[in-house]
Amino acid sequence: MNPIKILLTASNGFIGSYLGAHLKNKFTVTSISKSEQIDKGDYISVDLSVLAGVRNFVDNSQKFDTLIFLVGLAHKKGKGQEIDEFRRINKQTLVNLLSALEEQKKLPNKIIFASTISVYGEKLHQNMYNEESNKNPFSPYALTKLEAEEFLLEHYGKQSWILRFAPVYAPDFQLNINRRTKAAGRYYKVGKGSKKLSLCNLENIGLAVQGILEDKVPSGIYNISDEIEYSYNELLKYVNAKWVVRIPTFLVKGLYVVGKMMNNIFLKENATKLISDNIFPSDKIRQFIDMPNTLDSKSTNNNQQDEQKNSIVK
């Protein structure tokens, strides 16, 4: 039996690099990235925002069984960008690639799309969000990721797997933990530090994708997160914080009110995260596969480069 042929996008990013290494021993992986470097072997430089270049790539490529689409302009890298730029990267690249594949009758049987739990939008009086929860995205990143989801569901729903990642971490990638425990070089917590949130171990993403490739998971929308939630106190213990500044809850609530009055998305969204639980259970996909990795797990992925980490999809 021939191995499954995979087209992996954003392959030089943090998640893409891991998945490429994780899958290549069992599947045939062709990796593409916008990164400008000499084409070599199964690594190809393609700017998916330029339709002519996408068509040229598809015209000269084989038919793939599965597309893993990881392209994304995330919060930090997109700071100061207009929503049209987010839309160009987060949705139009997907539209370009799928339309070119369909034109050439090379559409894959499976489309795995990396999305984000941010599509739900944090709410002060809601602590838990499953796949059926209402979507109310705040940021341009989340808005355009949801637009891409809707495009997939409308045109390719039966062959699409939409994976909404909780904030991703690995032993050598602590950005999404540091964002929630450290500011201006100081560790902090709001109130008692007892509020809880979901995170996603990088290796759980690998297990989810592999489960889909092995026909264990039906098409649909899935939250991807660890099986347990973490309090801010647990995160501070994990990073071995010695001195922690305690910020009164009422001050952060005040920032939320100011953000709401000023329509400041960044202020409102981040204040909400700090004063409410943010739990995104992955029970739906766990009906089909096991994803046991947590903060306490030992990772086999310890060799990513700093420049790769900045391109993570959160």
Image (spheres, rainbow, N blue to C red):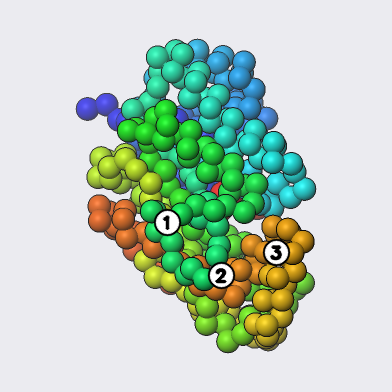
Which disc is residue 215 wearing? none
Residue bearing the label numbered 3:
260
In the image, residue 271 above or below residue 82: below
- How far apart marks 2 and 3 lie (CA) works out to 12 Å
User: Whole-percent x and y of residue 176?
Assistant: 59, 62
User: Label for residue 133?
Assistant: 1
Horizontal and vertical percent position of residue 313 = 56, 49
Quarter the N terminus occupies: top left
Q: Write the residue at 61% across / 85% down.
A: 191
- Amino acid type of the residue that numbered disc 2 sits on in the rendered structure: Leu
Q: Amino acid at mark 1?
A: Ser
Callout 2 touching callout 3 (CB < 8 Å): no
> Would you name the residue on which mark 2 appears?
124
Q: Secondary structure at mark 2?
A: loop
Counting residues from the N terminus, which is met first, the one under dot 2 or under dot 3?
2
**Element type where label 1 sits in the image:** loop
Q: Indicate which disc, 3 or 1, sits on the residue closer to the N terminus.
A: 1
**Is residue 58 placed above or below 126 in the rendered structure?**
above
Is residue 34 rendered to the left or right of residue 186? left
Residue 3, quarter of the rendered image: top left
Residue 274 placed where, x, y %?
Answer: 61, 73
Taking the spot 48% from the left edge, 68% from the top edge, the residue there is 126
Tag 3: Cα neighbours inside 10 Å, few (<14), some, or many (≥20)? some
> What residue is drawn where x is 77% and y is 48%?
80
Mark 3 vs mark 1, CA separation in Å? 22 Å
Label 3 is placed on what type of residue? Lys
